[in-house]
Amino acid sequence: MVVEPRVKGFLCITAHPAGCAKNIDEQIEYVKSRGEIKGGCKTALIIGASTGYGLASRITAAFGCGADTIGVFFERPADEDRGRTASAGWYNTAEFTKKAKEAGLYAANINGDAFSQDAKNRAIEAIKKSPRGKVDLIVYSIAAPRRTAPDGNTYKSALKAVGEPLTSKSLDTDKKEVVEVTVPVGDEKEVFETVKVMGGEDWELWIDELEREGLIADGCASLSYTYIGPKLTYPIYREGTIGQAKKDLENSAKKIDAVLKRRGGRAFISANKALVTQASSAIPVVPLYISILYKVMKAKGVHEGCIEQIQRLFSTQIYNGKAIAFDEFGRARIDDLEMRPDVQKEVFEIWPKVETSNIDELTDFAGYQSEFLRLFGFGLEGVDYSADVPLSVALDD
Ligand code: NAD
């Protein structure tokens, strides 16, 4: 079938198998071009491994550190009969697995609900079968809209403000219009449920299970990702419902750190740059901020994508042989370039001036859009988008 992008709001419901594969190949080549990460992990469990920051973590672990990997994710296979493509993360993982195996690395895939006991059991079996039988890196990079917890209840996360509603400029990415949005206040239940989904409870459950099974190697590191960003996005992010969940995640990092320290390991949170991913495109206000940020950072030659961010995190922070340069709250910071005062100053000089008529002039909306489409395998150089491609691609698990 000839596959074309079909964008609905902040989702693209199709994905291009060859384009996603090309995207993975480019990320692998980037990591290889930066050289071997000495003293890196040997067996990595990545929870949320198929897109965005988790995918970049898996690629960096495998092709930077030479690690065996166990990836957990929630992706949809193709349905040839109905002409439905697989999800991008499915194609990403198929290509990653092919390349990892060609490189002689163990790569096991668990496609299932990371919050469930079943996915945990399957990951445990895959770790036991891996060459070293234990993990020395655990990355928790889930971005999910809901979670069925061990108590049997299903909780939903909300992207809302806390305390006061937020009225702000935003971008209607479908219509390419600057609009005003009001983000309502989340009530107590919504805050509670968002913490249940995006907080650290499930990360802690994973560590408990792995510890009980004796699968954590000495010196094991575990990390999860957060976003801090500028004050302007605080009401929707840092101080919003999602921010409350991130605070909970930071508390979990401390508890997990205490567990791993007993084996000479550690756990921490890394604050990463705002980037176009399937998760971030759903957050109000953020796409406009990202479009301006990309413009400023590209002009200064300091723009990075997920793979550049994570390769830098691994090579200069986690495995640089020195102590990690934590901030006062114990977080690693690879959002340093985004938060640079000169970058932020320029972003906020542009912010009040942006309107629908000058989007192209003042922002990198074109870059935002092309990066969004690349997430689904569209717009990559060297891919013949007029060719018939098989939709079903085997996921080696
Ligand atoms: P993403 O949507 O690209 O990736 C989410 C991953 O979670 C995918 O692999 C998906 O398959 C997996 N997943 C979702 N629900 C699952 C489930 N129930 N079971 C198993 N797997 C499931 O998101 P992302 O932007 O890479 O976000 C990852 C982390 O990085 C999040 O904690 C996010 O807050 C953080 N972060 C993102 C940004 C950003 O700008 N995108 C910035 C800083 C931090």
Image: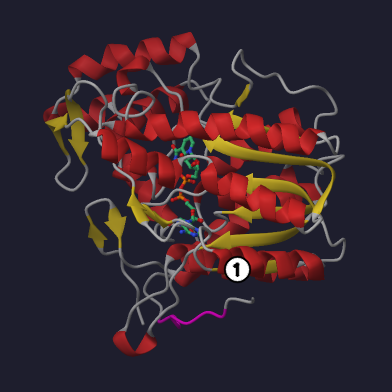
Task: Tell me the residue that label 1 is attached to.
Answer: 110
Q: Nearer the viewer, residue 237 or 61?
A: 237
Residue at horizontal 71 percent and vertical 64 percent from the top: 124
Q: Nearer the viewer, residue 155 or 218?
A: 155
Q: Nearer the viewer, residue 216 or 69?
A: 216
**In the rendered image, is residue 276 in sight?**
no
- From the image, which quarter does the C terminus lie in? bottom right
- Check if residue 18 falls in the magenta segment: no
Judging from the image, what secondary structure is the residue with disc 1 in?
Answer: strand
Q: Residue 386 location in percent, x, y?
A: 36, 74
Side of 185 relative to 307 (left or right): left
Q: Nearer the viewer, residue 396 or 203?
A: 203
Q: Residue 143 location in percent, x, y?
A: 45, 48
Q: Residue 176 location in percent, x, y?
A: 17, 41
Q: Magenta stretch?
A: 388-394
Res. 67 image quadrant: bottom right
For the stretch drawn in magenta, what is the main secondary structure? loop
Amino acid type at image mark 1: Ile
Residue at horizontal 59 percent and vertical 61 percent from the top: 72
Placement of 297 over or under 281, stated as above or below: above
Q: Residue 186 location in percent, x, y?
A: 23, 34
Placement of 300 over or under 145, stated as above or below: above
Farthest residue, direction bottom: 81
Res. 4 image quadrant: bottom left
Side of 312 relative to 180 (left or right): right
